[in-house]
Amino acid sequence: MVKHPPKKTPPTNRVRSASGEDFEEKYSQEAKPSFEEIQKLAYHIHLEKGGSELENWIEAEKTLKEQRPAGSSR
């Protein structure tokens, strides 16, 4: 019988409190820019400055996070 490694579960926004109940982390999904928002801005950064895809992605994500305070909605 072939043993397969256990499937990795993707990380979530949930953490477990000391009492055992689940709750969302301080920084909710709403405060984070969407994939599409980051992708669009990273593309425009690439058109303006060139650079690597990773550097442009990080710059776009940072810029969008600074524009949207934690807890705000899209």
Image: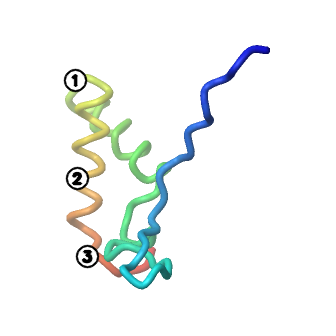
Outermost residue on the front side: it is 1
Badge 1 marks a residue whose secondary structure is loop
Q: Quadrant of the C terminus?
A: bottom left
Dot 3 amino acid type: Pro
Residue 35, horizontal then vertical, whole percent: 47, 49
- In the depicted view, which residue is nearer to us: 15 or 30? 15
The mark total stands at 3
First of labels 1, 2 by sequence position = 1
How did the renderer colour the structure? Answer: rainbow
- Between the C-alphas of marks 2 and 3, the distance is 12 Å
Kindly report which numbered mark, 1 or 2, lies closer to the viewer in this rendering.
Answer: 2
Residue 65, horizontal then vertical, whole percent: 27, 62
Badge 3 marks a residue whose secondary structure is loop
User: What residue is pinned by disc 2?
Assistant: 62
Dot 1 amino acid type: Gly
State yes or no: discs 1 and 3 in contact (Cβ < 8 Å): no
Residue 10, horizontal then vertical, whole percent: 53, 47
User: What residue is pinned by disc 3?
Assistant: 69
Residue 59 numbered tag: none
- In the depicted view, which residue is nearer to us: 15 or 40? 15
In terms of image quadrants, where is residue 59? top left
User: What residue is pinned by disc 1?
Assistant: 51
Q: Tell me the crowding category of disc 3: few under 14, some 14 to 19, or many 20 or more residues within 10 angstroms, Cα based.
A: few
- In the depicted view, which residue is nearer to us: 35 or 47? 35
State yes or no: discs 2 and 3 in contact (Cβ < 8 Å): no
Residue 45, horizontal then vertical, whole percent: 27, 37
